[in-house]
Amino acid sequence: MSTPTDTAPKPTRIAPIVTPDAKSFWAAADEERFVGQKCGDCGRFTFPPRPMCPHCHSLKREEVELSGYGTVHSWTVPRHPHPFGFREAPVVAVIQLDEGIRMVSNVVGVAPEDMKMDMAVEVGFEPTMNNHKVPVFKPRAQ
């Protein structure tokens, strides 16, 4: 008797490098939750996660759920050399999150020639090697 095999291709995207300060961010991403860090004193959001608020230097950090919505601030498509871990050249974008912070991620589900400044996007998650997930963004339905 034969057993069915999973024919889905294995992810080629490299797993994230997890630092002590960003451990909870990546653990949440593995659960498909999009979290950020907010200062417990001044209330400002920061990214990437860090031990001290860059604005008021407080050590009080709070992990909060983020909306997952933002806009494309800028983007590029690296073509040479071919980006390791991607089947096709990815759209690498700076995303301005609704919470006021920016992060670098990929925009998926849109051709590079259809990218636009201030395109509304929302977070999604894609698998990586070693059973992790990373946040990516896709065009938001209007």
Image: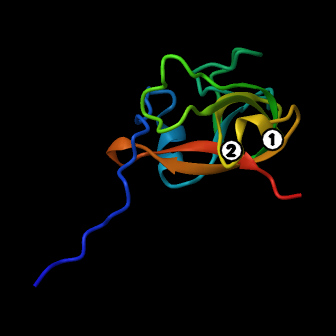
Image quadrant assignment for residue 13: top left
Image quadrant assignment for residue 56: top right
Decide if residue 120 is on the left or right side of residue 15: right
Residue drawn at 65 percent across, 26 percent down: 77
47 or 77, which is in the foreground? 77
Q: Do the residues labelled 2 and 1 touch (CB within 8 Å)?
A: yes
Name above or below for residue 131 compared with residue 98. below
For the question of whether residue 62 can be seen, the reply is yes
Question: Alpha-carbon neighbours of circle 2 within 10 Å: few (<14), some, or many (≥20)?
Answer: many
What colour scheme does the image use?
rainbow
Residue drawn at 85 percent across, 35 percent down: 116
Decide if residue 131 is on the left or right side of residue 2: right
Report the disc number at residue 70: 1
Residue drawn at 68 percent across, 44 percent down: 137
* Residue 54, image x, y percentages: 71, 15
Label total for image:
2
Mark 2 secondary-structure assignment: strand
For the question of whether residue 65 can be seen, the reply is no
Comes first in the chain, label 2 or label 1: 1
What residue did someone put label 2 on? 137
Name above or below for residue 3 compared with residue 105. below
In the rendered image, the quadrant that contains the N terminus is bottom left
Residue drawn at 39 percent across, 41 percent down: 12
Amino acid type of disc 1?
A: Gly
Mark 1 secondary-structure assignment: strand
Amino acid type of disc 2?
A: Phe
